[in-house]
Image (spheres, rainbow, N blue to C red):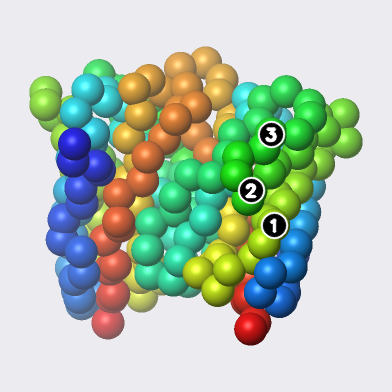
């Protein structure tokens, strides 16, 4: 069975640009969460979606948005990129929002220059 | 507030035992996870504790004391491949959302 897949694995963007990151959860999982991990830190919660609805939002500016599609895949969008947005963006999928069994994708390494 | 503390770095010798501690103060608690993360890779699940006590899984054990807000991960018979960061995370499930609150991670270096 395929695990959580994220694309792209790496990308480089310029300040002020926009980026879209994609995540496909494990088959049968309906909940997707996004985390940002800055180098040397633990992951920070950005969003949780379940059944295409936003269920939770972390302390991130409105430049960050996300959505979930009918097939439960998800996109994370970041507008007006800043240097500080450079990080590993992780997607985690679980059956339900309770997240007692969350599986992480390999992440997207975003570098903003 | 939400606060999870764990040591920044630890060093141990191959074949030895190491204990990584984690203390937490969070507004909610629905369990505590330990993840292993190799450099540049995704976190991989090691253990989940929701009740007090010790959970053993092969070379890895995890302990939880909810009254003390304390957990530890015990790694036995250390191998070189155990060199990684170990993340302590509290599950905060309230209302309709559940999110993990992570510590900064403990970088473990295993020496020959």
A25 vs A45: above or below: above
Q: Which of marks 1 and 3 is nearer the N terminus?
A: 3
Q: Which residue sits furthest top? A: B95
Circles 2, 1 touching at the beta carbon (< 8 Å): yes
Disc 3 is attached to a residue of which chain?
B
Quadrant in which the N terminus of chain B appears: top right
Q: Are marks 2 and 1 on the same chain?
A: yes
Q: Where is residue A90 in the image (x, y as percent from the top left)?
A: 35, 52
Disc ID at residue A29: none
C-alpha separation, residue under disc 1 versus residue under disc 3: 14 Å
Quadrant in which the C terminus of chain B appears: bottom right
Q: Name the residue under label 3.
A: B55
Going 21% across and 69% down the picture, which residue do you hit?
A10
- The crowd level at tag 3 (other Cα within 10 Å; few <14, some 14-19, many 20+) is some
Going 47% across and 22% down the picture, which residue do you hit?
A98
- The crowd level at tag 2 (other Cα within 10 Å; few <14, some 14-19, many 20+) is some
Q: Position of residue A52 (x, y in %)?
A: 22, 23
Q: Nearer the viewer, residue B19 or A63?
A: B19
Q: Name the residue under label 1.
A: B76
Q: Which residue sits furthest right? A: B68
Q: Name the residue under label 2.
A: B60
- The crowd level at tag 1 (other Cα within 10 Å; few <14, some 14-19, many 20+) is some
Is residue A64 shown left or right of residue A71?
right
Disc 2 is attached to a residue of which chain?
B
Residue A36 appears in the rendering: no
């Amino acid at each position: 069975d395929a695990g959580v897949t994220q694309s792209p694995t790496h990308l480089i963007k310029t300040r002020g640009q926009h980026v879209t990151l994609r995540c496909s959860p494990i088959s049968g999982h309906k909940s997707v969460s996004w985390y940002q991990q800055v180098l040397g830190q633990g992951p920070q919660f950005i969003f949780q979606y379940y059944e295409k609805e936003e269920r939770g939002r972390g302390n991130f500016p409105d430049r960050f948005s996300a959505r979930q599609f009918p097939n439960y895949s998800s996109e994370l969008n970041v507008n007006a990129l800043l240097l500080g947005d450079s990080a590993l963006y992780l997607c985690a999928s679980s059956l339900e929002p309770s997240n007692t069994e969350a599986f992480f994708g390999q992440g997207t390494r975003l570098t903003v220059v | 507030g939400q606060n999870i503390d764990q040591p920044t770095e630890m060093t141990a010798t191959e074949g030895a035992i190491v204990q990584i501690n984690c203390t937490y103060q969070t507004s909610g608690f629905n369990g505590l996870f330990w993840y292993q993360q190799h450099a540049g890779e995704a976190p991989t699940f090691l253990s989940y504790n929701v009740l007090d006590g010790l959970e053993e899984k092969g070379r890895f054990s995890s302990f939880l004391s909810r009254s003390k807000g304390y957990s530890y991960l015990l790694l036995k018979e250390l191998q070189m491949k155990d060199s990684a960061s170990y993340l302590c995370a509290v599950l905060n499930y309230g209302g309709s959302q559940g999110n993990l609150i992570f510590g900064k991670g403990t970088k473990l270096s295993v020496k020959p």
